[in-house]
Amino acid sequence: MKRNMSNTDRIVRVVLAVLFAYLYFGGIVTGTLGIVLVVLGAVFLLTAVIAFCPLYAPFKFSTYK
């Protein structure tokens, strides 16, 4: 997998993942929406760690210079 995410993109995703985890584990968002946010946060965190977004690939989009 070729890197297609810039550092700014990665930082935004990590911040969102932490925010989603806080909202769920803090009891602010519960139920189905809470679970969706946790799963989305996990995906954001994983893509930030590997610096590759599978949704960017089919469109040949890259934020990495």
Image: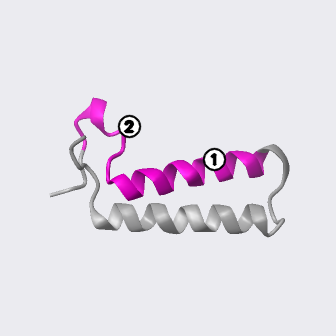
Residue at horizontal 70%, vertical 69%?
A: 22
Q: Residue furthest top?
A: 58
Q: Amino acid at mark 1?
A: Val
| Image quarter in which the C terminus is found | bottom left
In the shown orientation, is residue 18 left or right of residue 12? right
Residue 46 colored in magenta in the image: yes
Q: Residue furthest left?
A: 65
Crowd class of label 1 (few under 14; some 14 to 19; many from 20; radius 10 Å): some
Task: Give the distance between the C-alpha atoms of the residues marked 2 and 1, in whole angstroms.
Answer: 16 Å
List the residue tagged with mark 1: 39
Bounds of the magenta span? 33-61
Rendering coords of residue 30 (x, y %):
83, 55
In the shown orientation, is residue 30 left or right of residue 1? right
Magenta region, mostly helix, strand or loop?
A: helix
List the residue tagged with mark 2: 55
Q: Amino acid at mark 2?
A: Leu
Q: Nearer the viewer, residue 60 or 48?
A: 48
Residue at horizontal 44%, vertical 65%?
A: 12
Rendering coords of residue 31 (x, y %):
85, 48
In the shown orientation, is residue 51 left or right of residue 47? left
Rendering coords of residue 26 (x, y %):
79, 70
In the shown orientation, is residue 15 left or right of residue 28? left
| Image vertical order of residue 28 relative to residue 2, above or below | below
